[in-house]
Amino acid sequence: MSKLPLARLDRLLANLGYGSRRDVTDLMSRKQVLLDGVAVRDGGLKVPIGPDLPTRLTVSGQPLDPPAPLTLLMHKPLEVVCSHREPGRSVYELLPHRWRARIPALSSIGRLDKDTTGLLLITDDGPFLHRVISPKSNIAKRYVATLDRPLKGDEAEVFAAGTLMLESETDPLAPAVLEPLGEREARLTITEGRYHQVRRMFAAVGNHVTGLHRDRIGGLALPESLAPGDWRILTADEQAAIFG
């Protein structure tokens, strides 16, 4: 059985966004950091980073934030962006404020534009992020598109052919699966992640997407119970389901 990794308590708290090392020292001096109910004053104390740490360690009366690696499942709402740099309100503003200072930083796994809703994964786990987005993993993403004009009837065949070219690109798209849901609504499953791909695919066949929602990544579906703007920690079983 492998030993749990150890971390200096002051460095751990600083990396989780509780403040600078000096801020953390101040919290300890005011008996705001408790381990198993006992105040900790020594910032150099090394603590095991195990799954039970948030239940053993409290800061200002609250359980410790989850240490890295951390992956979140979010129902992204309209009018928020997935970038730290892009103008406008971001998905990171939906998380606790101090989480923006976490080291390593949280990043979205791929992006949804501000007019697209649905399943978004946010993580500080670099290997997991790269595994999800790697072309070798061939992870399918499923979207529900609302369209400006009625489907013509040949879109499924065109998308499945693997020959569709997007404007300003030289490589054809990989085959995609289209399922009509109504006259102006369709479900589309793709395995690539090109810029605004779904919108550009429908534009290539003479239509315009007026609403777009992602409801699945791999074998992971967006829970119906998760309202727009809500999020929760992704479980180990859910992580595995992505690749199942």
Image (cartoon, helix red, strand yellow):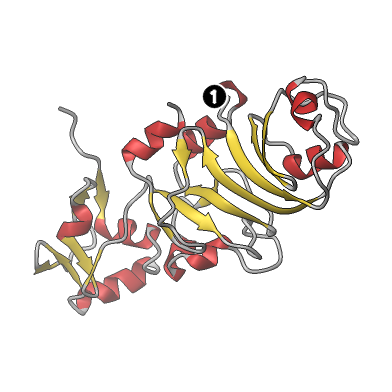
In the rendered view of the protein, which quadrant contains the N terminus? top left
The number of numbered badges drawn on the structure is 1
Q: Which element is circle 1 on?
A: helix
Left or right of residue 15, residue 6 in this image: left
Q: Quadrant of residue 82?
A: bottom right
User: Three-letter amino acid code at disc 1?
Assistant: Ser
In the rendered view of the protein, which quadrant contains the C terminus? top left
The correct choice, above or below, for 96 with respect to 221 in the image is below
**Residue lying at 19% horizontally and 29% vertically, measured from the top left:** 2
**Residue lying at 81% horizontally and 53% vertically, measured from the top left:** 148
The correct choice, above or below, for 72 with respect to 43 in the image is above
In front of the other: 215 or 34? 215
The correct choice, above or below, for 237 with respect to 165 in the image is below
The residue indicated by pointer 1 is: 137
Q: Quadrant of residue 69?
A: top left
- Whether residue 102 is visible to the viewer of this picture, yes or no, is yes
Spot occupied by residue 77 in the image (x, y as percentages of width and height): 58, 62
Left or right of residue 210, residue 5 in this image: left
Q: Residue furthest front?
A: 183
Left or right of residue 208, residue 144 in this image: left
**Residue lying at 88% horizontally and 26% vertically, measured from the top left:** 170
Spot occupied by residue 52 in the image (x, y as percentages of width and height): 18, 50
- Whether residue 195 is visible to the viewer of this picture, yes or no, is no
In front of the other: 42 or 87? 87
Q: Quadrant of residue 183?
A: top right
The correct choice, above or below, for 224 with respect to 140 in the image is below
**Residue lying at 24% horizontally and 75% vertically, measured from the top left:** 60
